[in-house]
Amino acid sequence: MLRNDARTCPTDGSDAEDVEKLPKDTRLGNYKIERMLGEGGMGFVYEATHEVLNRRTAIKLLRPELATHEQVVTRFLNEAKAVNLIDHQNIINVYDYGDGADGSVYFVMEYLEGETLDDLMRKRKPMALSLLLHTFSQIAKALAAAHAKQIVHRDLKPANVYVIAREDNPYFIKLLDFGIAQLRGEGAVQGLTQAGSIMGTPQYMSPEQISGGAVDHRTDVWAMGVMMYRAATGHAPFKGEGFGELAGKILQESPKSSRELVSTIPVELDKLIKSCLERNLSDRCQSIAELIEGLERVKVATKLDDAAILAAVWEDAGAGAEDAPETIAERTRKSMAGSMPQYQGVDQKVIDQARAGKLPVRAKTPLPFAEPKSKTGLFVVAGLAVVGLGVGAYFAFGRGGSPAKTEAPPIAAKSEEQPKPDLKPAAKLTPIQAAETAIKEAIASGNLQQQGQAVDALALVRHINTAPHLYTALKGSPEIRVKAARALGDLELPDAAPKIRAALAESGDKVKVELAAVLVKLGDKDALAILKRAVSDPGMKLAAAIALAESGDDKTAKPVLAELFESTPAGREQWRRSAYGLTKLGDAKAKAALEGELAQPDAARAVAAAELLALTGDAKAKDYLKRVGVDPDFARRAEATIALARMGSSDTATWLDNGFKSADAEERKLAIAISALIKDITRDGELAKLAADDPDRSVRLTAAAALIARGN
């Protein structure tokens, strides 16, 4: 159903089709639509190609009912203005934008392939000092350029920082989403960012933002402090069960010293983070320039010059090669899932007022469009940076769920007789039926964001009931295919092998390695040849060697794993996975190294090692997971609990109450998955409510997958 007055194509006035999805090859000016990448409360995002320059870009479609309101459009165009005013290499590029008199709005930004800083932080817990200094120095320089133009970002967070690989820099930073930036000194813009308007993302909001007060550049300094704290320790400085509790902690409490959590953090870095997180503005680090000076002091204190840092960063990038079979594009897509902001872009009150018709409507006059291949939805065009195969959550689209529906105005009757509507009420779906429908629709949507979230949900709950949906997903794009195959491998379903073999035949080399690893796990010896060839490829050898080790191929796997284990710094993911593979082959040294990780003060490292050891049958590791899973003060309690649940243990299910109530979407998803994995837990009512009402679509889909798994 079309929304509000968006019933006709602006090209010729004829009836338009649904704007939910523009078909491939639709023309928007000089741009050709390639595919839909994501959506949110404010609009839709597509990959597009400039037809003359053959440049890959992005197109964002703003919902028509919002684009008719001056205040919303002004906010929307502020991003393009802000980015162009700054003009810095570490800030996303804007190529083009326009504001038509008929209400049509667009701007186009560069297409990035990589991952968000949020993704990187999840993989590097805590982040190595060299990598932290390298990334945050770049972010700080971008902010310094913005502040020099009197622009305050106001929604700085890891999901709005993008990390891409360049020939001279494997972790090159691009700062995104100036959608709620404050352009100081411009009256029209100042009116949209006045005191009393709470805008931003709660976990990274400064006290003055939380309280609705006036903000300045020190708000961005605070957000930098929150991000550095999380990068250095692996933990957020402030946590709460909901916005109220989180806000209270930000306004009233001071976080633990970063060195209390990770004793190896340099004193100078601990001081810098603390100064950024001072609630009193006059006590806080006073500028980004001062913050940059603080980072330089950390370098001096730790005897790290730029050359040493860059060398360490290149080493880190090489140590991350285990991610290579999971393509950059796949990592990008995953970054979309959990980071749709709750408060971003246009103030939610403004959106609500626009939908309710309480804002002034902009005057409309015709604006010519290029003749489209299809007349579908050529109404309001806008572009934002698109990241890899996915749309980053920074798109200023509001929540990640389906858009709120609005009443469409009456349409003049056509000359031909219209069919009479069926007045019989539709039968109400049971929770299971609704769950099946939600998963099916997401996989069939053609939207990579929704497809990825659905397959992630099915993989998380690990149940045979999800197999039919995973078989369907095997027919999808390469990154979706890999995820579905891995999930089927975890289910150990021999019947899945023929379907995975069919998918393998249509895949490229890296995807073939992933699928071959699953086939070997399912007993397909023919796939061993693919893995044996892959161990000579730097980007694929870890995944191939581990799969070979799990199959018992000592001769091929052991030399590869031993080389990776010895050459990778302890605690890194590649080191840990190499040690796991060697342990599977009976290597006592590797097993002892993993056992030593259980004594690590870094909870993330300890739990990750314990889970891998437990998979090899190590009783001590399983006991460790049980012990920390019931410890309310243990930082990675949720991960320990789900690791046990995957092994069939319900010993730590007491964490579920906290998990279901958590303000963190990732923790809610873990709690949902545990309830699906442990048979004697009955949370079906809560699952049905989350599947229907949770504000995060990835949580809704995980709850739907859990209902399917439980089968009632």
Image: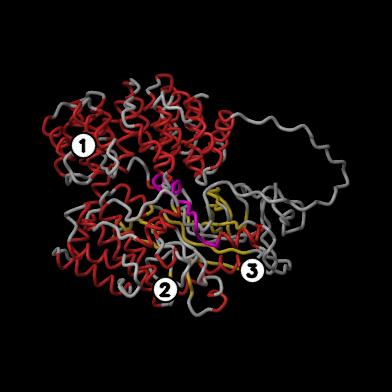
Which image quadrant is residue 561 in?
Answer: top left
In the depicted structure, whether residue 409 falls above or below residue 642: below
Please provide the residue range marked out in magenta.
329-347
Q: Name the residue under label 1.
A: 578
Residue 475 position in % (x across, y down): 50, 32
SS under mark 3:
helix
Q: Mark 2 points at which residue?
A: 216
In the depicted structure, whether residue 310 falls above or below residue 469: below
Which image quadrant is residue 628 in?
Answer: top left
In the depicted structure, whether residue 699 falls above or below residue 515: below
Residue 29 position in % (x across, y down): 62, 61
Q: Mark 3 points at which residue?
A: 70
Disc on the earlier residue, 2 or 3: 3
Disc on the earlier residue, 1 or 2: 2
Q: Per the image, is 309 magenta?
A: no
Q: What residue type is labelled 1?
A: Ser
In the depicted structure, whether residue 486 falls above or below residue 21: above
Q: Per the image, is 334 magenta?
A: yes
**Residue 545 visible to an observer of this rendering:** no
**Residue drawn at (16%, 63%), measured in percent from left and top?**
304
Question: Horizontal placement of 318 versus 457: left or right?
Answer: left
Residue 429 position in % (x across, y down): 63, 30
CA gap between label 1 and label 2 equals 48 Å
Q: What residue type is labelled 2?
A: Asp
Residue 185 position in % (x across, y down): 50, 80
Please state which of residues 108 and 685 is positioned toward the viewer in this rendering: 685
